[in-house]
Amino acid sequence: MSFIDLFLKFVDSTAFQSITWQNLLMIGVGGLLIYLAIAKQYEPLLLIPIGFGAILVNLPLTGLLFAPAAGEAGGLLYYFFQGVEIGLFPPIIFLGIGAMTDFGPLLGKPQTFLLGAAAQLGIFATLLGAKALGAIPFLAAHNLGFDFAEACSIAIIGGADGPTAIYLTSKLAPHLLGPIAVAAYTYMALVPIIQPPIIKALTTKEERLIRMADPKPVSKRTKILFPIITTIVTAFIIPASAPLVGMLMFGNLLKESGVTERLSKTAQNELINIVTIFLGISVGSKMSAEHFINFQTIFIIVLGCIAFGIGTGGGVMLGKLMCKLSGGKINPMIGAAGVSAVPMAARVVQKLGQKEDPGNFLLMNAMGPNVAGVIGSAIAAGVLLSLN
């Protein structure tokens, strides 16, 4: 074989002839996610792996997603994604979150648990909206509607909890994992931009100026019993939520027990960091051009934004009601922290409160509904799983 023949054979083996404009567009999307993570610091621990995964999967002829066949090994990203597909990675993420979470503010003011529940309103309102799209004749004729399982997966974006959205979607609608994961983490990252206008529109200046007493101190015994009792009660009522709630509470028990410091630190650091890398790049691997560039993706992103907005509004409105019932002792802004974006939503409330009154410190009060939102979104996912 001549040198020219070898050169032509090499040229034929390259990916240049197989690349499409759709692939190039998705490579650009991956680059944009990496830019937002680095330049704007929007969820960098996840957006960088997701963005790079999107680049990898849109490079032709790499075989990274090939399933094993005829005795041959599959592609690298195929094996990574098995951790998502079998529901392994999200619960491990919850284990790490639990080990980093202090439920003290919630236990010190247990009534704030209601605010975390109210913020899940966006999930169920969007579920009805997504399902209703299928009843529109034009959308139904062009196969642009969503069935119940797909609608559930889209609705969970409203909980502002990336791992929960990934877990539920991997069970109910894995073909929508790419756009749903990107929407969930994008809106989590944009909490400081999306929430303030909603909070200001639903509250008065007088309400935003309300100062709150700090949550009462909680005993060590209470902090140890809480994850055990919560796991048992939740698993009895909503068994499908046990993987997420159970791992969240197990991680918290490692933290609060005081005798498993090594395990707690591992869950908070090495374990969650390793799984975050695999989870992010696995999610990015579902952002191939053929699965991502369509009208359904646009609908998912729009519905996700609506879900997040309704969730924020639901928490604030219940906060206003609690404010009136308490005689003005509860600042309704803390209801916005009921979404599961920990601790970003609580920090938004703190920042808004100090903007109105530099001496007003709402962070600890906002952390109560914020951590309640983590539990609430996991429970909501369990409810949706049990309905399918």
Image (spheres, rainbow, N blue to C red):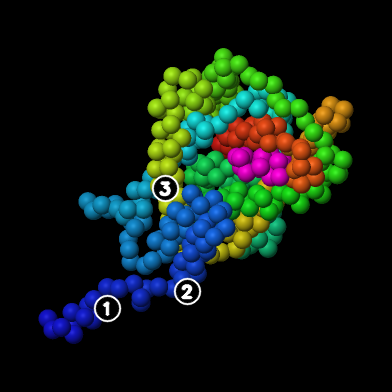
Query: Which residue is rendered at x = 49% and y = 19% of the image?
Result: 257
User: Which disc, if any, is residue 21?
Assistant: 2
Q: Which SS class for mark 3?
A: helix
Q: Which SS class for mark 2?
A: helix
- Within the magenta stretch, is there residue 347? yes
Q: Which residue is mark 1?
A: 11
Query: Which residue is rendered at x = 61% and y = 61% of the image?
Result: 298
Q: Give the mark, 2 or 1, whose residue is nearer the N terminus.
A: 1
User: Which disc, if any, is residue 223?
Assistant: none
Q: Which residues are magenta?
A: 336-351
Q: Give the mark, 1 or 3, whose residue is nearer the N terminus.
A: 1
Query: Which residue is rendered at x = 68% and y = 63% of the image?
Result: 138
Residue 126 in picture, x, y percent from top left: 68, 47
Residue 3 in picture, x, y percent from top left: 15, 83
Query: Which residue is rendered at x = 55% and y = 54% of the image?
Result: 41
Q: Which residue is mark 3?
A: 277
Badge 1, how many Cα within 10 Å: few under 14, some, many 20+?
few
Report, in whole angstroms, how far the alpha carbon at label 2 lies from the one at label 1. Answer: 20 Å
Badge 2, how many Cα within 10 Å: few under 14, some, many 20+?
few
Q: Give the quarter of the image for residue 162.
A: top right
Report, in whole angstroms, how far the alpha carbon at label 1 lies from the one at label 3. Answer: 33 Å
